[in-house]
Image: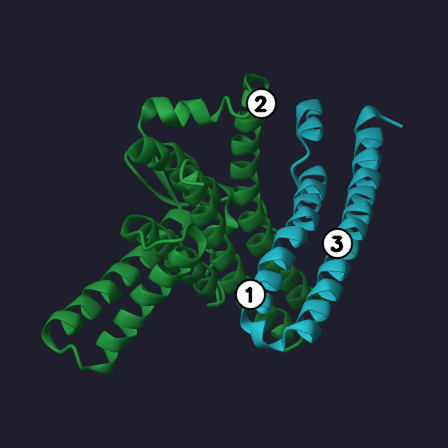
Chain colours: A green, B cyan
Amino acid sequence: MNLRIFGDPVIFEIGPVPVTETMVTSTAVTIALVSAAVLLRHFVSRQPHHWLAIVAFMTVDSFDRLVEEIIGRRHAIVATLAGSLFLFIAACNIAGQLPGVHPATGSLATTSALAAVVFLSVPIAGIWTHGTWEYVKQYFRPNPLMMPLHVISELSRTLALAVRLFGNIMSGHLVVGLLVALAGFLVPTPIMALDLLIGLLQAYIFAILSTVYIGAAISAEEE
Amino acid sequence: MTDQTIIAVVAMAGAALTMALGAIGAAIGESRIGAAAMDALARQPDEASSITRTLFVSLAMVESTAIFCLVVALILLFANPFLSVMGN
């Protein structure tokens, strides 16, 4: 059998740019999510009593309430970011259960990109809310010796965010692959069911943690 | 024994040790989380939904240390930088 842990096979090339399997899967997931969103938008604006419109309202409201529980008030931009992260990661993880599809989140490149988005959102949110000077001053609190520790903690939590998602999804896929090779038909089914749960849970955790990090930058001054 | 063999043997032993010790730590942490959640549920059954959500989030965060160990072990076994530097 073919163990794929860190590699990413190139499917075809556009000029000098190699297009890998992960890029194809994540693009397909993005297209599916965007078309679902466009469909729901049509129902919300034209027939607000259709059940698809109610599904859309409930989705948006659940992310709003999630952000409200963590930050303490409604915040549309953070809710949008957390919701997009959750839906993309959850859709990627569930798409990985389809036969022959390797989940896009099982590649370290995808998860690093998602963690980098969170890493960059934190200073943007902080500077937007408090201004540059106030935000930078937070690093020198409670005293200037803490500055390196603050920087290290931001870097290490970004690394942890990326490796946690990658490790969970990749190891789940690997275990299923090993069981198929060793035991065969129907034996890996319970593990695949566990993978469904873990995929949704990891997407939820990624969204929660990014909201917590951004919320800490937003509300640091208000306490 | 060539250098290649020594590196491979040490990498395998290292991977096994990483996984074993990492699993012990995560297992102890998760059992404590589970016990604390049971305690909290017994005291405040009304808060079940909030406790369960926090329980799952903390379980997954503690689990991630074991997952880090798994990633390191897999790097040692399948993507060992020292084996490829030696040229095989």
Q: In front: mark 2 or mark 3?
A: 2
Q: Report the residue at 64% width, 50% height from top.
A: B64
Q: Chain of mark 1?
A: B
Residue that numbered label 2 is attached to: A146
The quadrant the C terminus of chain A occupies is top left
Examine the rendered structure and indicate whether residue A100 appears above or below residue A27.
below
Residue that numbered label 1 is attached to: B53
Q: Earlier in the sequence, mark 1 or mark 3?
A: 3
Cα gap from disc 1 to disc 2, whole angstroms: 32 Å
Q: Amino acid at mark 2?
A: Met
Marks counted in the figure total: 3
Assess whether mark 2 and mark 1 are in contact (beta carbons under 8 angstroms).
no
- Front residue of A152 and A97: A152
Residue that numbered label 3 is attached to: B29
Q: Report the residue at 71% width, 44% height from top.
A: B69
Q: Is residue A29 left or right of residue A39?
A: right
Q: Residues within 10 Å of mark 3 (few under 14, many from 20)?
A: some
Q: In front: mark 1 or mark 2?
A: 2
Q: Amino acid at mark 3?
A: Gly
